[in-house]
């Protein structure tokens, strides 16, 4: 139902097409690497440009969930109503470093405007279209890398301890149902039967069978990047600092003193993409929603599926490196140092869900979600620069949406239709 309009091409035909030219993909996070792989499959000679090794940004430490159900934007009336209480509680799932308020104000204003029910409905519909194909889009990349088991197809449990929070989510669940997301409402006992590590405080759950997860998001990027290199893809360990444009087209990407000729350029530098898009003539209101994780190798807890606690704004996933507790949102900027108190909050909140959880000996991390105020990424050509594409701003959904984004960029660059309505993701919406 959701994959209409896509012109199917046999995989082999795609792989053996004549070369299309040189493509520069800026950023080696999950979005950049997946995009590079799809362009490579289409015959482009692709170079990924990044000063870091693949997967060192936000893609390194996320919660690992392919959250195909996650179609409700972060900005809703429901969220706005909870903001004042959260801002005065220093342990709440949302925190703001007040001195950054002036620079964040335009983004917050746009988020507020995007929270109108009519916009929420439209954004959810657009995201449902994008996310319907996420597992389909990952499959050929994982098969080609010889690592189909990097994803587990076990679904996701969203859980609630607070009765009021569950009732408040009724409208969101109704939208999801209407948009074709498969879900099942469970009571506390039913959730505990499936996930015995959960304690008695869990009162409600929602089961999403079509979600998946990875046991190691960092390794996922690394393995895909290795496959890209094995198939002739190149890496430049440099920071992109400018573009050369001629006649409304990019002709070269300049990075750390080197000029790379380019017939196609894709900006997929996550939370660092805004200045690069500006250089191409398109400003996009991108901010970082900073998130934290703690990974506990000796947690004493094993979960069959990831869990998403609505009350605490955290996800918990059993992974190869240990039990990962990840989430919460901190609004500051890209430079502010991490606040280790946020990592400890994750542990204490998780303990209320998992009474047997052993805390200690874990590793702490903070990462930058590249977030746009309407919770939708930009995926499409830069207005006025037809061979430059933007592919960033996936916020809470970068792992989920990476492969389908990469496939869409390759489709657009080849003049094919994407398999979903791409118009709502156009960078031109911010013109
Ligand atoms: C705590 C937490 C939990 C999360 N959980 C999930 C989850 O369960 N599921 C999900 O789907 N998403 C999740 N996310 C979101 C997800 O991690 C991000 O949306 C995603 O990783 C973004 O990927 P990216 O490739 O766009 O950016 P990144 O992974 O940040 O990569 C950007 C790359 O661009 C490079 N770069 C920057 N500037 C330049 C330049 N000038 N030139 C060249 N390269 C440059 C950087 O070095 C970096 O390697 C989570 C995020 C956080 C913080």
Image (cartoon, rainbow, N blue to C red):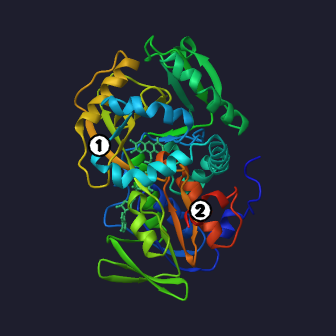
Query: For this view, does 142 lie left or right of residue 413?
Result: left
Q: Position of residue 179 (x, y in %)?
A: 71, 40
Q: Which mark is residue 365?
A: 1
Q: Which mark is residue 131?
A: none
| Circle 2 crowding by C-alpha within 10 Å: few under 14, some 14–19, many from 20 | few
Residue 233 seen in this snapshot: no
Above or below, 53 relative to 197? below
Label tally = 2
Q: Nearer the viewer, residue 107 or 212?
A: 107
Query: Looking at mark 1, is its residue's CB closer than 8 Å to ligand 1?
Result: yes
Q: Which mark is residue 429?
A: 2
Above or below, 57 relative to 191? below
Q: Which mark lies nearer to you, 1 or 2? A: 2
Q: Nearer the viewer, residue 222 or 279?
A: 279
Q: Residue 320: which quarter of the image?
A: top left
Question: First in sequence: mark 1 or mark 2?
Answer: 1
SS category of the residue bearing label 2:
helix
SS category of the residue bearing label 1:
strand
Q: Disc 1 to disc 2, how far (Cα)?
A: 33 Å
Q: Residue 94: which quarter of the image?
A: top left
Q: Residue at x 71, y 63 (%)?
A: 10
Q: Residue at x 56, y 67 (%)?
A: 431
| Circle 1 crowding by C-alpha within 10 Å: few under 14, some 14–19, many from 20 | some
Query: For this view, does 2 lie left or right of residue 161?
Result: right
Q: Residue at x 53, y 16 (%)?
A: 163
Q: Position of residue 342 (x, y in %)?
A: 29, 35
């Amino acid at each position: 139902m959701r994959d209409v309009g896509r012109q199917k091409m046999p995989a082999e035909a795609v792989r053996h097409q004549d070369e299309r030219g040189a493509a520069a993909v800026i950023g080696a996070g999950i979005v950049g690497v997946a995009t590079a792989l799809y362009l490579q499959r289409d015959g482009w000679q692709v170079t990924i440009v990044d000063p870091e090794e693949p997967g060192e940004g936000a893609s390194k430490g996320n919660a690992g969930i392919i959250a195909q159900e996650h179609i409700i934007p972060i900005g809703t009336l429901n969220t706005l109503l909870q903001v004042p209480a959260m801002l005065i509680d220093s342990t709440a799932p949302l925190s703001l470093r007040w001195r950054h308020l002036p620079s964040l104000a335009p983004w917050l204003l746009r988020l507020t405007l995007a929270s109108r029910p009519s916009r929420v409905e439209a954004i959810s519909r657009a995201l449902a279209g994008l996310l319907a194909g996420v597992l389909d889009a990952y499959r050929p990349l994982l098969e080609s890398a010889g690592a189909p088991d990097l994803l587990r197809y076990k679904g996701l449990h969203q859980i609630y301890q607070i009765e009021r929070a569950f009732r408040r989510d009724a409208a969101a669940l109704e939208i999801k149902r209407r948009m074709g997301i498969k879900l099942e409402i469970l009571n506390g006992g039913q959730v505990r039967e499936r996930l015995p590590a959960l304690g008695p405080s869990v009162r409600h759950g929602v089961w999403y069978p079509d979600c998946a997860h990875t046991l190691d998001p960092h390794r996922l990027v690394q393995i895909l990047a290795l496959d890209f290199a094995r198939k002739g893809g190149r890496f430049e360990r440099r920071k992109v600092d400018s573009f050369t444009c001629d006649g409304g087209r990019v002709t070269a990407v300049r990075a750390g003193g080197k000029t790379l000729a380019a017939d196609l350029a894709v900006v997929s530098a996550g939370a660092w993409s805004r200045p690069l898009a500006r250089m191409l003539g398109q400003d996009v209101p991108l901010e970082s929603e900073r998130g934290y994780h703690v990974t506990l190798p000796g947690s004493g807890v094993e979960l069959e599926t990831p869990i998403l606690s609505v009350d605490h704004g955290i996800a918990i996933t059993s992974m190869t490196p240990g039990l990962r507790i990840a989430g919460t949102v901190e609004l500051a900027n890209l430079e502010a140092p991490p606040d280790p108190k946020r990592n400890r909050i994750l542990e204490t909140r998780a303990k209320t869900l998992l009474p047997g959880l052993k805390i200690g000996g874990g590793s702490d991390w903070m990462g930058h979600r590249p977030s746009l105020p309407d919770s939708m990424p930009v995926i499409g050509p830069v207005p006025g620069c037809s061979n430059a594409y933007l592919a960033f701003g996936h916020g809470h959904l970068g792992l989920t949406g990476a492969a389908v984004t990469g496939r869409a960029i390759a489709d657009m660059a080849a003049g094919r239709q994407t398999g979903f309505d791409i118009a709502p993701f156009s960078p031109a919406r911010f013109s």
